[in-house]
Image (cartoon, grey):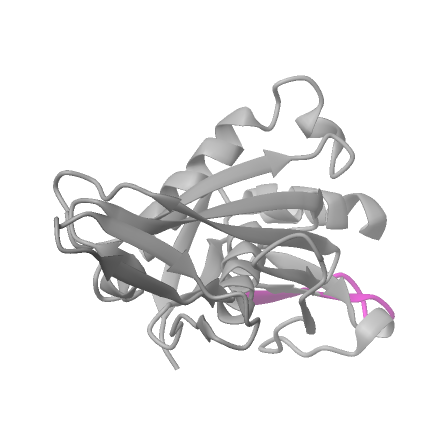
Amino acid sequence: MASVALSEAEKVYIVHGVQEDLRVDGRGCEDYRCVEVETDVVSNTSGSARVKLGHTDILVGVKAEMGTPKLERPNEGYLEFFVDCSANATPEFEGRGGDDLGTEIANTLYRIFNNKSSVDLKSLCISPREHCWVLYVDVLLLECGGNLFDAICIAVKAALFSTRIPRVHVLEDEEGSKDIELSDDPYDCIRLSVENVPCIVTLCKTGKRVGKVLHASLQSVLHKEESLGPKRQKVGFLG
């Protein structure tokens, strides 16, 4: 985190790798950008959320479907992530430009959510080795204005918080055959606890290249905020 003064009339702050003109939103050097979170925005999903962080806009939908537990985790459900870097979000995503970034984001989400300390995956198990809930999490990048990992993590956490999973009743007959019944009561559902899901904050270390970039117009600088620092670190925290 650092501040660089272009002049008394135009001061630009670099906050978590993001630059903002103080005349635009009045933020100080240590102020994070305003985050807007809206849940239940997509009707045909089990849960959804939309997050706006500055000029970054993320939409996440979650669909709960029945599946079979993985062999290595027979008494747990699991999450699958799909990340779509829309070409409308930034010209860099045209063609296959966003594929590598989408893969990187998906791999990061797997590391965060598919572990016992983050989400209670056992609560997604219906019957060990036979049936479980699989949560398909679709992430759509509508607009990219920096801090993508931060905004996506918040959006996924909010979408999972709003997710409603139908309660399942397993009936077993005398011969041992199992019959699964799903509750049709929308209020008779399972809600995931996301209390232990960490939030990501991206930190950008700036170097000598910053001075050269800052001589450009403010508008062009805003578009290059992710490239200001040669190194970016992602830190997760609880609380």
Residue 56 lies, in percent from the top left, at 70, 54
User: Nearest the camera: 84 or 98?
Assistant: 84
Q: Residue at x 54, y 26 (%)?
A: 99
Q: Is residue 145 above or below residue 201?
A: above
User: Nearest the camera: 62 or 221?
Assistant: 62
Residue 215 shows in the view:
no
**Residue farthest to the bottom, as pictured:** 239
Q: Give the image quarter of residue 213.
A: top right
User: Nearest the camera: 50 or 67?
Assistant: 67
Q: Please state if 78 lies on the left or on the right of 10 as rendered.
A: left
Residue 34 lies, in percent from the top left, at 69, 74
Q: Which residues are magenta?
A: 2-12
Q: Residue at x 53, y 50 (%)?
A: 63
Q: Give the image quarter of residue 190.
A: bottom left
Q: Is residue 140 above or below residue 160?
A: above
On-image quarter of the C terminus: bottom left
**Is 55 within the magenta?**
no
Residue 20 lies, in percent from the top left, at 74, 63
**Residue farthest to the top, as pictured:** 95
Residue 215 lies, in percent from the top left, at 76, 46
Q: How many marks?
A: 0
